[in-house]
Image (spheres, rainbow, N blue to C red):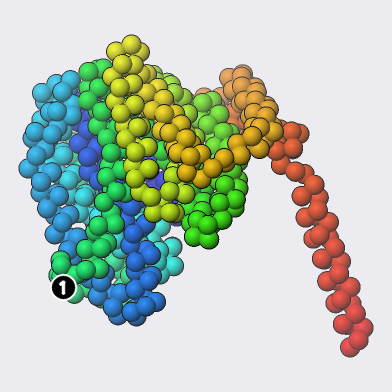
Amino acid sequence: MLSVAGTASGFLLDALILGVFGVGNPTDALSAALTIPLIIGSVLRAQVPKVLIPVFMEHCVQDGESRAWDLLRNVVTTSFFVLVGISLVGVALSGAIMPLQIPGLKSDAISLSVWLSRMLFGLVLFQGLGSILQSVLYARHSYLISSSGRLVANILTIAVIVLWNDHFGVQTVAGGMLLGELGQVAVLAWALSMHGFQYHWVLKPTDPMLLEIFRAFRYPLAGHALAETASILQNVLGSFLGSGRITLIRYATRIVQAIAGLLLGSIVQVTFPLISQHAASNNLTALRKTLLESVRLLGIVGLPVSIWLIFAAEPMLVLLFVRGEFSRADAALTSAIVGFMVPYILLSRIIGIAQTPFYATMDMRSPLISIVVFTVAHLVLATLLVGLLGLFGLPIALSLASLCGAGYMIFKLQRRFGPIGWSELWSFAFRLSATSALAGMGFAIGTRLARMLTASGSMAKLLDFSVPTSFGICSFIVGAFLFRLIDGRLFLRGAWSRRFFLRRSSERTSEISDGR
């Protein structure tokens, strides 16, 4: 629930930034300055838990809690110096990095981006420490406070922008983000102290366990960082397409990634432990079956979400963002970019699912190669398509590069783990397509009906978004039963089972009362 609240607060923060500062050189400079710090932060958030959670849990079981806390103190202290070093290097190189990243912007925008970049590299320190503390909280099965960090950071950032944007302009966004991430670290540290952790200075950089932890990060960090370079390429090419284009691409990407991560990210997370269990027992049949079930679930959730984004992106953007300096024309252009990015939502998750058997068997090389395939394809396609199609070449290149990465991983799956059994999905694919087509008709009817309604102001924006969404969801549910994508007999059995249970419970209660 707090993860949903964090995502929602992120949309509110985006709406505030666009409403106050609009789409132009200042927000382009901010978007470019955020790129590298956020790449490093996303890499740390994604990869630190994969290594630190099992290591910490193993230490607690084998060596006791006190030894695990000592290891954590050493990890925190050593990581602090590493992260400070990365931040200082970023600050020192900002003057050289930013002109290379946005060569097409005006000189004043480049100068502003350099200044903002020097501020925002401080995020690396706070995000890195936050990822470590959050991972240990997960290992302690503490999810409430650890999931609230993004919400805390966004609320503090919003407060700073509201209070001081008139005095410091777009720099208040950078200052607010720094304060927000610091607040997140403080909340996580407080939560960890409730579990008995008390920090004091421990610095043993040559500790074998610490070195083993750092070595385990090599391939995952390299692969994730390589995949995130797509953002840098978008900045470079987008800087030649006119003022505000970098901002539009960034926010379209944020919307796609936020919705995909919120609704589809858990499918990959649930698949990984199941695949690991089957790989450990060398049960390839069960492994392949789990993969197919994951693909089915991805289709059931991902395809309607994709259709919804195509129809609802523009009214959603109008509802959330059109105020102040952000216009309806900006919303229409952003929604078109989102539409071209829709295939990326499904394809990127297919890549994630296909990578799980390789991670489960400790094969880090094949997933890394798939990321190299994606990166090279994106570089070539983006360069070609921007010259042909302009701004829309960037999202199309991202989707096509994801198709290349997914094709490679499926090919590797077949070679490594044998025939997956894709033919078993033909009937499911037909039923899902028919259901999705009916949902698309529902969205189209809802969109036309919303245009016929007479309303103004905020109510009109709300109706433009909610009416097509409601019609589309209802049409998908009807289609799911009509085309047997969902078996209605399961619900009937569940209803009869509940009635039978309630009746038997009532009879037994009466019998007990009579016995008394």
For the point 39% across and 77% down, which residue is it? 61
Can residue 121 be seen?
A: yes
Instruction: Report the number of numbered marks.
Output: 1
Around disc 1, counting alpha carbons within 10 Å, would you say few (fewer than 14), some (14 to 19), or many (20 or more)?
few
Q: Secondary structure at mark 1?
A: loop
Picture coordinates of residue 217, whole percent (x, y):
28, 54
In the image, is residue 15 above or below residue 377?
A: below
Q: Which residue position is annotated with label 1?
A: 201
User: Is 247 left, or right, of 424 in this rendering?
Assistant: left
Which image quarter holds the C terminus?
Answer: bottom right
User: Is 103 left, or right, of 470 in this rendering?
Assistant: left
In the image, is residue 411 above or below residue 178?
A: above
In the image, is residue 100 above or below residue 295?
A: above
For the point 59% across and 52% down, which residue is it? 286
For the point 44% across and 67% down, which residue is it? 141
For the point 9% across and 39% down, which residue is it? 93
Picture coordinates of residue 34, whole percent (x, y):
23, 39
The extreme top residue here reads: 388
Amino acid on which disc 1 is placed: Trp
Picture coordinates of residue 455, whole percent (x, y):
56, 24
The extreme right residue here reads: 514
Closest to the observer, 203 or 213: 213
User: Is 323 left, or right, of 508 in this rendering?
Assistant: left
Picture coordinates of residue 494, whole percent (x, y):
77, 55
Can residue 466 be seen?
A: no
